[in-house]
Image (cartoon, rainbow, N blue to C red):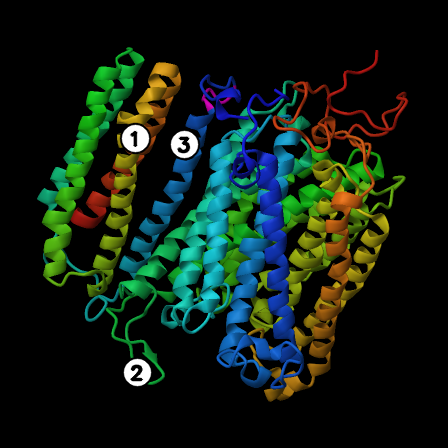
């Protein structure tokens, strides 16, 4: 039984109003909320439980050396990439694979830009300054949370690259199916952005 | 649908298959193998417990000088065996069998679907599980042996443990990922692929149990994944998430940044592991409900009540986790909260059990092999559940915490409880999978010996625990209070070894019946649910014609009918 012959792979189910892939994506995102939720909870618990001063105390802003300008710029990069992701899906809905591909390429480029900025302006200089994960609980959480988020970004880039390249063949066979897959990718992409929208204030501003 | 236009090769058909039935059988066989392996670990440990410091006879020498010099088990090896017994039984044995095995095979058939909603994802979840399982086994061969900080892996102990702990964490990440993929698939399948006419309240109870279980897996597992990542960071990157400031180990101050919290791990771990308890029991209740309905030849009492109780149980299971942590000094207010929720969650469990018990009233019971196991499940699960109540109340838990009483309690739930349900399910659905019956005489021998011996294993533990013997002891006879109850511990050990021997009946029966078992029709148990409408074994695509459902799942002994069962897919006769 190939997936193409199962019901509701393309058409929405009358009760859930979603095709199977979209429903599955939402469920997957629910589990992702629990994953990042556990990390944010750990952040709260460790910060509240940290001693006021001395070893193990919570780092103040000038001790973290994190620039809100770099973080803010990266936030902007991700928000724009979310917009281009929607544009890709909208273009497919209007029947243009050309345009959709262009928007997907912009999305992927912005995502790569985010990772490059993160590495070259933040991770590498920090590690050189000795601000490594074992430096303090703040940096331990900082690297774990942003690192896991960056892995999600990279995963997203791989999926988007697949749909720009070999995955696009599906469009000629079944345009609606392909459009649906881009929609699901978009859902995931917005979620990854959303995680950053929480990470940015929690790590750079609070 | 029934015919294949192209016949896939051997690898695609039996190894990397996307057919839910093949994947179900793969899960089942792998899970049963791990179950046996985990049981062997404990049979070995029981020698050290019964006869501490004596060489293990016959097989003692094969474990090498590092683990068992001269056949005498070292404490470190004992700890590894203990941690791996728990991990393997729960994460590699019982859950894959219940959800991966029975869920994958039976659920799509019971909803009348041609396959799971995402067949490729289904294949992937099996292979991620298999990778996790192999990773866990690799732990035995690294320096310092497999993980040895208990299945709960409490830090700081686990942070400082040997390399085996890192392997354990990586293995867990694989197993968690596999469960996530599986649970997404189950939920979408139940929501989207039900046959025409199969409304939610016409679903067999087994499907409901699997559905709630899937939600528990989906939402409870990720926090443990997060905790696993944090502990990996602690072990590999030198962070101190779980390492408090000023920790001194064996007189040596630890050079960590500090400020971490060992309790954070416990919270994250039990946030998974308490719902996990219900993952272990709900599908088992589902199996037992199917078999009891079929063998009492009447609808189970209170089908809707059972469904509502299951959903309520699912919700509640997320807010009881800290009853595992009464001894951590989290304060009386929090303890009172979690004690209250724990008392509340016992209500739906009792509701389901009572409904199943009342179902037996005035029934003309068929004492088939699956029914024997299902009937034994009821009192065994009841003993397990009732002995849990003193553990849910802080005052009595303080005395009983971490003693053999706890071991007795949860083993009554999962061993003669869940594992009996697994056996019941294997005997019940075996004819569907192979087209042949398992031998009833061997099955009855298997049942009676298992039933007697398993009680000899676990019943004495309550007394050992009440005498105050800690579950972590390598040799309880060094303490006077342990020495006083050593006879009971020896009894448990002999029970375990005899229980191991009793499984030979099952293993022989399982393999012989594949070729020698009595051939059966599509519906050998005269059952009503949809899986029995498909051929035995069901072909690729399952149903010759897509079934349409006309009625609820358990229409047995309907007045005015020729037969005492009315299958879901047969239109009523005038």
On screen, residue B500 versus residue A62, left or right, reads: right
Alpha-carbon distance for marks 1 and 3? 18 Å
Asked if A125 appears above or below B481 in the picture, the reply is above
Query: Looking at the rendering, in which quadrant would you find the N terminus of chain B?
Result: top right
Q: Residue at x 46, y 42 (%)?
A: B180
Q: Residue at x 26, y 39 (%)?
A: A153
**Between B450 and B364, which is closer to the camera in this rendering?**
B450
Of the numbered discs 1 and 3, the one sitting upstream in the chain is 3
Alpha-carbon distance for marks 1 and 2? 52 Å
Given contact means CB atoms under 8 Å apart, are the residues at marks 1 and 2 in contact? no
Q: Residue at x 38, y 46 (%)?
A: A35
User: Whole-percent x and y of residue B504?
Assistant: 75, 60
Chain name for mark 3:
A
Where does label 1 land, which residue?
Answer: A162
Where does label 3 land, which residue?
Answer: A25
Label 1 crowding class (10 Å Cα cut-off): few <14, some 14-19, many 20+?
few
Q: Is residue A186 visible?
A: yes
- Residue range corresponding to the magenta coloring: A15-19
Magenta: main secondary structure equals loop
At mark 2, the secondary structure is strand
At mark 1, the secondary structure is helix
User: Whole-percent x and y of residue B133?
Assistant: 50, 55
Q: Closer to the observer: label 1 or label 3? A: 1
User: Whole-percent x and y of residue B307?
Assistant: 65, 36
Quadrant in which residue B60 is drawn: bottom right
Badge 3 and badge 2 in a common chain: no
Q: Closer to the observer: label 1 or label 2? A: 1
Where does label 2 land, which residue?
Answer: B252
């Amino acid at each position: 039984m190939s997936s193409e012959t199962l019901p509701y792979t393309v058409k929405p189910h009358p009760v859930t109003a979603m095709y199977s892939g979209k429903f599955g994506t939402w469920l997957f995102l629910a589990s992702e909320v629990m994953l990042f939720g556990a990390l944010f909870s750990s952040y709260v618990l460790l910060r509240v439980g940290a001693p006021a001063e001395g070893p193990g105390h919570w780092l103040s802003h000038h001790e973290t050396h994190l620039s809100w300008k770099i973080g803010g710029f990266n936030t902007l990069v991700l928000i724009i990439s979310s917009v281009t992701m929607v544009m890709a899906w909208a273009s497919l809905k209007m029947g243009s694979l050309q345009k959709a591909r262009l928007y997907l390429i912009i999305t992927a480029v912005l995502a790569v830009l985010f990772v490059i900025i993160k590495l070259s302006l933040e991770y590498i200089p920090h590690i050189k300054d000795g601000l490594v994960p074992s430096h303090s609980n703040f940096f331990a959480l900082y690297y774990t949370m942003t690192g896991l988020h960056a892995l999600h970004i990279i995963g997203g880039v791989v999926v988007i690259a697949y749909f720009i390249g070999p995955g696009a063949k599906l469009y000629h066979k079944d345009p609606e199916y392909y459009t649906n897959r881009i929609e699901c990718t978009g859902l995931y992409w917005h979620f990854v952005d959303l995680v950053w929208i929480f990470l940015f204030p929690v790590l750079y501003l609070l | 649908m029934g015919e294949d236009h192209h016949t896939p090769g051997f690898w695609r058909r039996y190894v990397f298959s996307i057919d839910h039935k093949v994947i179900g059988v793969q899960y089942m066989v792998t899970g049963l193998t791990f179950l046996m392996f985990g049981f062997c670990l404990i049979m070995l440990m029981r020698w050290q417990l019964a006869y501490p410091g004596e060489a293990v006879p016959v097989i003692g020498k094969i474990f090498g000088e590092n683990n068992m010099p001269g056949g005498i088990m070292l404490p470190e090896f004992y700890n590894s065996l203990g941690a791996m017994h728990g991990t393997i039984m729960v994460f590699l044995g019982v859950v894959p069998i219940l959800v991966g095995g029975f869920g994958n095979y039976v659920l799509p058939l019971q909803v009348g679907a041609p396959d799971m909603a995402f067949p490729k994802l289904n294949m992937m979840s099996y292979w991620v599980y298999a990778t996790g399982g192999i990773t866990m086994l690799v732990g035995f061969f690294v320096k310092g042996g497999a993980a040895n900080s208990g299945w709960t892996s409490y830090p700081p102990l686990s942070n400082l443990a040997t390399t085996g702990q890192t392997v354990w964490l990586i293995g867990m990440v694989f197993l968690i990922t596999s469960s996530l993929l599986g649970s997404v698939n189950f939920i979408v399948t139940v929501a989207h692929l039900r046959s025409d006419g199969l409304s939610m309240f016409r679903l067999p109870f087994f499907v409901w149990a699997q559905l709630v279980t899937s939600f528990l897996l989906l939402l409870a597992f990720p926090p443990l994944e997060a905790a696993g990542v944090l502990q990996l960071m602690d072990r590999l990157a030198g962070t101190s998430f779980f390492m408090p400031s000023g920790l001194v180990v064996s007189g040596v101050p630890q050079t960590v940044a500090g400020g971490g919290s060992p309790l954070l791990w416990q919270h994250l771990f039990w946030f998974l592991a308490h719902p996990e308890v219900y993952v272990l029991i709900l599908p088992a209740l589902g199996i037992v409900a199917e078999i009891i309905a079929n063998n009492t030849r009447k609808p189970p009492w209170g089908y809707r009540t059972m469904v509502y109780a299951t959903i309520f149980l699912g919700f509640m299971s997320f807010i009881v986790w800290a009853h595992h942590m009464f001894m951590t000094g989290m304060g009386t207010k929090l303890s009172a909260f979690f004690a209250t929720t724990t008392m509340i969650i016992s209500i739906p469990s009792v509701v389901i059990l009572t409904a199943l018990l009342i179902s037996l009233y005035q029934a003309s019971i068929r004492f088939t092999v699956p029914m024997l196991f299902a009937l034994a499940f009821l009192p065994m699960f009841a003993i397990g559940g009732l002995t849990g109540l003193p553990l849910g109340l802080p005052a009595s838990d303080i005395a009983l915490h971490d003693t053999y009483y706890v071991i007795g309690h949860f083993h009554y739930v999962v061993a003669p409880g869940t594992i009996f349900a697994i056996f019941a399910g294997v005997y019940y659905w075996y004819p569907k999978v192979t087209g042949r019956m398992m031998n009833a005489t061997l099955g009855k021998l298997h049942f009676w010996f298992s039933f007697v011996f398993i009680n000899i294993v676990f019943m004495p533990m309550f007394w050992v625990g009440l005498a105050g013997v800690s579950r972590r002891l390598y040799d309880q006879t060094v303490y006077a209070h342990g020495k006083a109850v050593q006879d009971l511990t020896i009894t448990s050990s002999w029970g375990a070894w005899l229980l191991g021997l009793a499984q030979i009946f099952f293993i022989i029966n399982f393999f012989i019946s594949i070729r020698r078992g009595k051939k059966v029709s599509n519906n050998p148990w005269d059952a009503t649910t949809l899986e029995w409408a498909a051929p035995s074994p069901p072909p690729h695509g399952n149903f010759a014609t897509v079934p349409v459902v006309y009625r609820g799942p358990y229409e047995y002994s309907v007045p005015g009918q020729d037969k005492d069962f009315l299958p879901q897919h047969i239109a009523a006769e005038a």
